[in-house]
Image: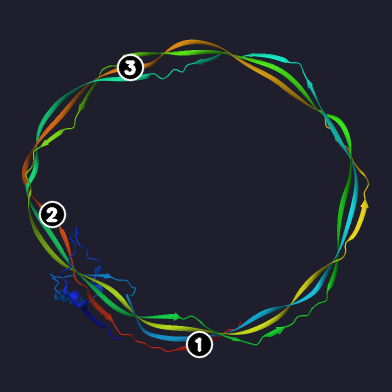
Amino acid sequence: MKIKASLMAVSVLAAAAFPLAMNAQESERYNPRGDAASTVLSQSEIDDLIAQARNSGVNVSGAADVRYVGGSDTAVETVQCCENVQEQVEERTEVQESEVAVPAVTERDVIQPIQRTLIQPVERRVPQGTKETVTEDMKYEENRLPVRVERDAVPAVTETVIPQETTQTREEVTESTYDVIGHREIIQPVERTVVVPVQRRITRPRIETVTNETRYETRTAPVQVQTVAVPQVTETVIPQVTEETREEVTEVPVPYVAERDVIQPMTRTTIQPVEHQILKGTKETVTADTQYTEERLPVRVETQPAPAVTENTTEQVTERTVLEVSDVYIDQVTRNVIQPVVITTIQPIERQVLQAQKETVTNPVQYEEQRLPVRVEDAMIPDTQVNYIPQVTEQSREEHSESYFEAVTQRDIIQPIVRTLIQPVEIRRPNVTTETVTAPTRYETVRASLVVLNIGGDCVCSGGTVETKVDNCD
């Protein structure tokens, strides 16, 4: 296999704009990605990369920093080289069985209905109850309750605070100075990094095997019929007896006293003594102790204005060049296609299956009648129920009386307050100075256009069509 290696620019337009595609100003120094490329590229390839960058207009000062950033093993492009087709033939035999039902009566049930009636004479004795009412003599009762005191609720004392405030103000004045910068000399270091991306396009052969969908072929053989024998009919007689019982009831009444109501009249009188206690509210005035407070106000600063600052900036520029080498892969695919072929021979078989049937025949109904001995049901006489019904008449009567009591319901509180306010005052005057500072290094990154390195060869095809045959009988 012949391997070709060459360097080329991505396009004429990209080469024209190759060197300067400056990024925005960065706050941190650019750190090259990857590892040293000496283990991946030869020294001659590294020299060719540097020369290609200089020819494209990139200012490579001194020795360039070549870095290998690697790449993914996944191919970015796939080239179809060859395709080999292989057929795999498989023969099968498939049996398709079907059943055909042959109806025939093989069993018969004969039902013989019999209806039998049983007559039951019944003599039932039924109790017949009565009710009577009795009234007792009147009763009188008197109930005197304890005295109920109804006292007016005492409300919470209402307090009213009346402040009497006196305010005094006093100032405390101090003077101070503060430093200000009138002129500033700024040294601005600038580190500019030129990044040249290099891409190695590597071609590699790859073989893949693809199995197509199976192609099916079907053949049908003549039908084979299997017959069945029909058996003789079997008969079964099933008697169905239905019994019905009918009662002839005769009722005999039995009298008795079932319920008695006893009325008890009563008169009850309730006496409730009630005493009302009425509130008389009073008011008082109290003078609290004098409160002395002192409040210190925030310091009031009076600052004299400072002059405007003048600045002078001097740049110190350093440059470096970084070549970032990455790999991409192009697969040259040789495809082997497997074409499965299945040939199926179908053998139909028709099997006759006996479908046994059963029928039921019902004969005419036979009627029978039978009379049972007389059954006597005695009456259950319950005890007499006595109901006591009290008739109570209640009367209520209240006896009222009144009294008075005193309580403090309002209080006025006089609160004297003396407050002193202290106002600190600070007067600040400027002190003008000159300083020289070095600003943080400003990092700039310039990205050049992509440089491509092609490594690989052409497609090489070999092979042919293969046929295999497999026999499979089901």
324 sits to left or right of 387 = left
| Alpha carbons under labels 3 and 2: distance apart | 72 Å
Q: Tell me the element at label 2.
A: loop
Q: Which tag is nearer the camera, tag 3 or tag 1? A: 3
Q: Nearer the viewer, residue 53 or 303?
A: 303
Q: Which residue is drawn at 70% across and 80% down?
A: 351
Picture layout, residue 468 above or below residue 174: below
Rounded to the nearest angstrom, the CA distance separating label 3 from label 1 is: 119 Å
Residue in the image at 69% along x and 82% along y: 350
> Could you tell whether 117 is left or right of 279 in the image?
right
Q: Where is residue 102 in the image (x, y as percent from the top left)?
A: 74, 78
Mark found first going from the N terminus, 3 or 2 = 3
Q: In this view, does 128 lie to the left or right of 177?
A: right
Q: Classify 10 Å Cα crowding around label 2: few (below 14), some (14-19), many (20 and above).
A: some
Q: Residue at x 44, y 83 (%)?
A: 337
Q: Which quadrant is home to the C terminus? A: bottom right
Which residue type does callout 3 highlight?
Asp
Report the side of 195 relative to 177 (left or right): right
Distance in Å between CA atoms under marks 1 and 2: 80 Å
- Foreground: 222 or 93? 222
> In front here: 20 or 408?
408
> Residue 316 occupies which quadrant of the picture?
bottom left
Label 2 is placed on what type of residue? Ala
Name the quadrant containing residue 238: bottom right
Comes first in the chain, label 3 or label 1: 3
Q: What element carries label 1?
A: strand
The image shows residue 128, relative to residue 56, as above or below, that is above
> Which label was assigned to residue 468?
1
Q: Residue 207 sits in which quadrant?
A: bottom left
Q: Residue tagged by mark 2?
A: 439
Q: Please report whichever mark, 1 or 2, sits nearer to the chain's N-terminal start.
A: 2
